[in-house]
Amino acid sequence: SLVLVTGANGYIASWVTLYLLQQGYSVRGTTRNDAKGQWMKEMYKDRGLDNFDYVVVADLENDNAFDEAVKGVDAIIHTASPFHWNITKPDDLIKPAVAGTVSALKAASKEPKVQRVVITSSYASILENRDPPGSATFNEDDWNEQSIREVDEKGLDALRTHWYRASKTLAERAAWDYVKKETPSFDVVTICPPYVLGPIIHEAASPETLNTSVGDWYKYLTGEKTTADATAPAGVLCDVRDVADVHVKALLQPEAAGKRFGIATRTFTHQILLDHVNADPKLAQAFPHAVRGVPGQAVPPINIYDTSRSHKALGIEPRDEGKTAVDMTESLRERKVKW
Ligand code: NDP
């Protein structure tokens, strides 16, 4: 079978693609330019995986963006969506997030072979801020209306995290609205990961070009971040390999049709991740300026993301955070040699 993965050069998409290739699927990725596709193709080839190819889709906001890319594919995994802060207004995130999702679904409607579209959403589309922190539990039945309201009411004055969270909520809602309105012959599944960390296999030519979540972690390793940052509540964590695994499982399980799936390891601060890394002699030596912070601190109250239902349905047992922290840092140690 042939699977189309949009934004294939991305952090999460590269692991999704790896797992698909390892399980014998052929993957066609979309990237915004030729060089990014070529890099991925060579990376998989180096791992003995030849069934990856790519097409360039320069602008996913175009309604017909994926028309060529979708030809002959059996399924689509749509991950491409902006998660970065190089923006000046909410629409810099909301427009591509929503339009990209709609163009992926419109393309799927034009290829009769497509049976399922899996969309990478986020817990951003589920959790709201509640006071006091730790007082609320959310699951896959919930929707984050708060960020949309904040952006509607405050526009540029809304917190930028709400811009991003609104972009993910509106994009996912656009997908379910499409299903309701168009009743397509394929089904849709959405994946709602929390904050994703873990090793990188995608291209990052410099620390500055790392994806947002891992790039942020790198600043703890170089000492650019502080002890105060490290001990601040960071949200809910999940390992990129578990997130990729969920995408593949959700693609294959018939009963997954029409559902949203969460996945989560635990609530966290960067401090608990640093504790694992600072205790590893090789990593401590590679990153001598890593924030040490105040080791052994308990994680402050953070609202709970209860994804147990999804874990049970898909048979997911997320890795613990020590593995996530150490493997991620090891992958960055290897990259650092070339930076
Ligand atoms: P990356 O930045 O590594 O990947 C994002 C991908 O989307 C890249 O291929 C990027 O292309 C593409 N993309 C971004 N904006 C556009 C645009 N305007 N037009 C076309 N392509 C675009 O990030 P992640 O792997 O972390 O993110 C992948 C998905 O996972 C996103 O949907 C994100 O919202 C979601 N997610 C991420 C979490 C995390 O903590 N990392 C948590 C929960 C959800 P290019 O490289 O050319 O910019």
Image (spheres, rainbow, N blue to C red):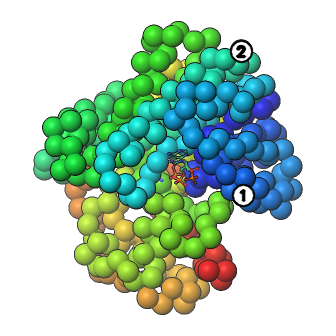
Q: Left or right: where does residue 270 sit relative to residue 59?
A: left
Tag of residue 112 = 2
The amino acid type of the residue labelled 2 equals Pro
Mark 2 Cα-neighbour bin, 10 Å: few <14, some 14–19, many ≥20: some
Instruction: Using the image, determine if residue 235 lies above or below residue 116.
Output: below
The residue furthest left is 132
Residue occupying image coordinates x 21% and y 36% = 152
Quadrant position of the C terminus in the picture: bottom right
Q: Position of residue 176 (x, y in %)?
A: 44, 21
Q: Residue 133: in sight, yes or no?
A: yes
Name the residue that disc number 1 marks.
35
Instruction: Using the image, determine if residue 230 lies above or below residue 320.
Output: below
Closer to the camera, 287 or 71?
Answer: 71
Residue occupying image coordinates x 32% and y 72% = 230
Q: Residue 307: in sight, yes or no?
A: no
Closer to the camera, 217 or 181?
Answer: 181
Q: Position of residue 104 (x, y in %)?
A: 58, 29
Q: Quadrant of residue 199?
A: bottom right
SS assignment at label 2: loop
Quadrant position of the N terminus in the picture: top right
Instruction: Using the image, determine if residue 161 lies above or below residue 114.
Output: below
The amino acid type of the residue labelled 1 equals Ala
Q: Position of residue 261 (x, y in %)?
A: 47, 33
